[in-house]
Amino acid sequence: MKKVANKDIIFVSIQLLLFVIYFIPVFTCSFRTNYIFRYASLSVAIIGFMIITLAILQLNKNLTPFPTPKENGTLIQNGLYKFVRHPIYTGIILLTVGFGFYRSSIWEISIGFALWILFYFKSKYEENLLAKHFDDYGKYKKTTGRFFPFIQNNKILKNKKAI
C-alpha cells in the first residue's frame, strides 16, 4: 500500500472539518430573500448534488479521497471531465453555496466559499501530481476549465483555446 503524503492528509482534514462545521450553526445570522431566489438557489444545490454523484460514478475505480492519483489510475477526460477538471469540487461548491442561499444562512454561504478557496489550492496541488503522473495532463489542462466550463486560469476558453 502506498504511503499517503502529509499534504494529502492536511487538505482532506481541512475539507472534512469544513464539512462538519457547515452543519453546525455557530453563526446564525441570516437574511431575507424572496421565494424565487430561494428556490433558484435550491435548484443550484440540487444540480451540485447531481454533478457530485455523476462525477463519482465517472471516476469509478480512479476515485480516491486524497489528491494524489492512484498508482494504476487512468486520466478521465470524458463525461463531465470533458468540461471541467474537478467536477466533484464544482458540485460541492454549488451544493454548499446554493443550499446556503436557499436557507439564507450567511454561515453556510461563508463555509461554501471557504471550501471554494480550499479547492483552489487543493486542485493546484493535485494538478501538479497529475501532470507528473499522466503525460497528457498538460494538454488536457489547457483545454478544460478548472471548476467551470470555459474558464481556465481566469481566462475564458473559446473554441477550446485560451484567449
Image: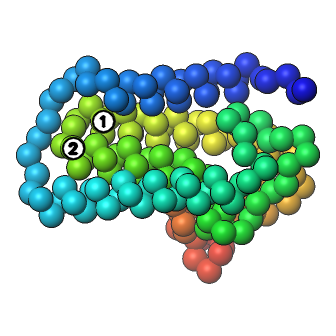
Residue 105 shown left or right of residue 81 in the figure: left
Residue 53 shown left or right of residue 38 in the figure: right
Which residue type carries mark 1?
Glu
Q: Secondary structure at mark 1?
A: helix
Colour scheme of this structure image? Answer: rainbow
**Residue 63 in the image, given as x and y percentages of width and height:** 72, 45
Looking at the rendering, in which quadrant would you find the C terminus? bottom right
Q: Is residue 144 visible?
A: no
Which residue type carries mark 2?
Arg
Q: Is residue 107 visible?
A: yes
Residue in the foreground of this view, choosing between 110 and 142: 110
Q: Residue at 34% across / 29% down in the picture? A: 23
Q: Secondary structure at mark 2?
A: loop
Q: Tally the marks.
A: 2
Which residue is tagged 2?
A: 103
Residue in the foreground of this view, choosing between 115 and 39: 39
- In which image quadrant can residue 109 be found? top left
Number of residues whose C-alpha sits closer than 10 Å to that of mark 2, classed few (under 14), some (14–19) or many (20 or more):
some
Which residue is tagged 1?
A: 108
Q: CA distance from mark 1 to mark 2?
A: 8 Å
**Residue 4 in the image, given as x and y percentages of width and height:** 79, 24
Q: Residue at 66% across / 73% down in the picture? A: 161
**Residue 57 in the image, given as x and y percentages of width and height:** 66, 57
Looking at the rendering, in which quadrant would you find the N terminus? top right
Q: Are marks 1 and 2 in contact (CB under 8 Å)?
A: yes
**Residue 111 in the image, given as x and y percentages of width and height:** 37, 33
Q: Residue at 12% across / 59% down in the picture? A: 35
Placement of 66 over or under 20, stated as above or below: below
Residue in the foreground of this view, choosing between 5 and 139: 5
